[in-house]
Image (cartoon, grey):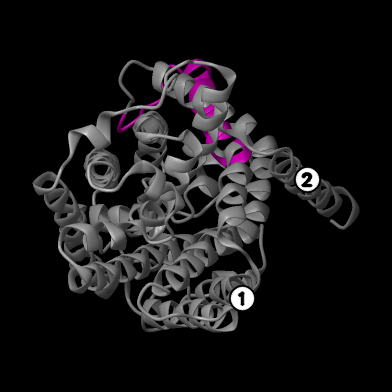
Amino acid sequence: MSQPQEQQGLVRGLGLRQATALNMIDMVGIGPFITISFVVGAMHGPHCIVAWLLGAFLSMMDGCVWAELGAKWPQAGGSYVFLQHLYGKKWGKYFAFLYIWQTTIQAPLVIASGAIGFSEYLGYLVPLSKIGAKAVSGSLVLLLTFVLYRNIKDLGKISVLMWLVVGGTILWIIITGILHFDAHLAFTYPENAFSWSSIFFFGLGQASIKTIYSFLGYYNVCHLGGEIEHPERNIPRSMFISIISISLLYLGMQLAVLGVVPWQQAAASKFVISEFFEMTLGAGYAKLATGLILFIAFSSLFAVMLGYSRIPYAAALDGNYFSIFGKIHPKGKFPYVSLLILGGIAFIFSLTLRLKEVITAIITMRILIQFISQAVGVILLHYRKPKVEMPFKMPLFPIPAILGICVWLFVFFSSEMKYMVGALLVILSGTILYFAKRYVYS
């Protein structure tokens, strides 16, 4: 089982403000700016707002699960720690191993997706060849690794400054949209838009994969549990503040775009926010907005890499992963080997993968082992140990957890077959490795 924070050598240097800022800049990366077009295209109309509402709903329901677990076990590693506690000594090790195995693949995918999205959006300002775009995405990963190679307290201060730019940019988009809003564009729906047919639900499923990708990160503070001050209070608070705030900002931003850019144009656009500013304030402001979006993408990847670097580190402390991942920087007191290896794998992925496929793979791969397993585990914990002390307990238990499971299953089965099969193959290969390690090579 993962060691207490005091034994890990980490410093609880992040307060509520820093924790919330890290959560929010994780959530608001390049995701919403590149997925708006995908979402509108999947739903074929301005009723795509339903997909954003579903993403917000799932984040809140699943956030209740994460809030309970993060407040109860505030240690580095997040799900790695939670799954061990939830499923006990025997099966907890198995689920935790599957999660680490999955994380070695999907964490660099997440970082690479942001870096690829950054390079693609940079194309609005500077036309790039395929090789040039790959050079940009790879260089970005290297730069992020360099920036993160320092003490956690310094990173907390940086995160707050980054969030001011992130929040200010989205508010600028919303206010500009309000001043130029055309209700006819935003609220004129295609015929049979809400038919509740199989076509509607197929489109909703495809769109929701993209909106949920944009919401991912509401749990980032749990990965940093060993470095949060007063975690029993600050972890749940930072999560719900993040989810509610980002939900309102995303909904406002999508409505702002729909009220300015015809949905057919938005669906086909690679730079929808830049075109939004071209149509409202002119080309100069469009370039400024594009620059801010690129800064937001960098800020999000900053938070993502910071959180994920703590997961292999926590596993290494347990002896469940390569011991080298458990090394702490002697002066900065951060897991520098884990950070460097994660950055190296992400660098390779950023040079070899395509964005749209990566987004779907990221979501589908994580649903069964991470999100659904945790929600089921929380329900089982309460019924097996009804008197267990929980610093935070979700309201209306177990309804939020059950609703979250239902939506996750809907999203999973909305994915293409190749992604579902890929997710199952990751589980199968991890299972084979786990039992081989345990019974053959032990």
Number of callouts: 2
Q: Secondary structure at mark 2?
A: helix
* The stretch drawn in magenta includes residue 373: yes
Task: Tell which of 226 and 98 is nearer to you.
Answer: 98
Q: Is residue 341 left or right of residue 172?
A: right
Residue 302: percent from left, percent from top: 37, 68
Check residue 84 in the rendering and tell me which mark sits there, or answer none. Answer: none
The image quarter containing residue 401 is top left
Query: In the image, is 213 to the left or to the right of 321?
Result: left
Query: Would residue 217 be seen by someone viewing this image from the given angle?
Result: no
Give the residue type that dot 2 points to.
Answer: Leu
Look at 31% across and 53% down and name the residue there: 23
- The numbered disc on residue 425 is 2
The residue positioned 12% from the left and 44% from the top of the image is: 178
- Helix, strand or loop at label 1? It is helix
State the extent of the magenta-drawn residues as a range.
368-392
Q: Position of residue 431 (x, y in %)?
A: 78, 45
Mark earlier in primary sequence (2, 1)? 1
Tell me if label 2 and label 1 are in contact, CB under 8 Å.
no
Q: Nearer the viewer, mark 2 or mark 1?
A: 1
Disc 2/disc 1 C-alpha distance (Å): 24 Å
77, above or below 146, in the image: above
- What residue sits 54% from the left and 74% below the top? 343
Instruction: Identify the amino acid type marked 1.
Output: Leu
Q: Which residue is mark 1?
A: 351
Q: Nearer the viewer, residue 313 or 213?
A: 213
Residue 305 appearing in the image: yes
Q: Quadrant of the C terminus?
A: bottom right
* 399, above or below 161, in the image: above
Quick one: 35 or 286, which is closer to the camera? Answer: 286
